[in-house]
Image: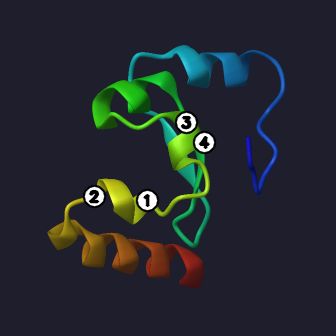
Amino acid sequence: MKRGFILPKGGYINLLENVTDTVLITDLKGRILFWNKGAEEVFGYTKKEMIGSSVERIYRKKDINKIKRIRKQIIQG
């Protein structure tokens, strides 16, 4: 799996992988770094397909500008 960060060791990663809810983690540029089984079921893409992809791939076009504004606020603090 391509990763730009290190996932926590121990039970946390197992928990994130196996919860039935959708869990995805992105970096500040919007690249997907983690994608669990719940995300696979909801969005229909495998982990292999999504790791390294832009999170914009799964959002509606009308929501992308909102996501960009939130990301900008996070970066600026």
**Residue closest to the eye, 61 or 74:** 61
Query: Label 3 sits on what residue type?
Result: Lys
Label 3, label 2: how far apart the Cα atoms are: 17 Å
Label 3, label 4: how far apart the Cα atoms are: 8 Å
Query: Label 2 sits on what residue type?
Result: Tyr
Q: Residue 33 at what x, y percent from top left?
A: 63, 50
Q: Which badge, 1 or 3, is on the more N-terminal residue? A: 3
Q: Residue 75 at what x, y percent from top left?
A: 57, 79
Q: Which residue is mark 2?
A: 59
Query: Label 1 sits on what residue type?
Result: Val
Which residue is drawn at the image coordinates 41% and 24% (left, top)? 38
Q: Which residue is mark 4?
A: 34
Looking at the image, do the residues carrying marks 1 and 2 touch, with CB atoms under 8 Å apart?
Answer: yes
Q: Count residues near mark 4 (Cα–Cα under 10 Å), then give few for <14, some for 14-19, many for 20+.
A: many
Q: Nearer the viewer, mark 1 or mark 3?
A: 3
Q: Residue 58 at what x, y percent from top left?
A: 32, 53
Q: Which badge, 3 or 2, is on the more N-terminal residue? A: 3
Q: Count residues near mark 3 (Cα–Cα under 10 Å), then give few for <14, some for 14-19, many for 20+.
A: some
Q: Which residue is mark 3?
A: 47
Label 4, label 2: how far apart the Cα atoms are: 16 Å
The kind of secondary structure element at disc 1 is: helix
Q: Count residues near mark 1 (Cα–Cα under 10 Å), then give few for <14, some for 14-19, many for 20+.
A: many
Please determine whether, in this image, residue 63 is positioned above or below residue 49: below
Looking at the image, do the residues carrying marks 3 and 2 touch, with CB atoms under 8 Å apart?
Answer: no
Q: Which badge, 4 or 2, is on the more N-terminal residue? A: 4
Q: Which residue is mark 1?
A: 55
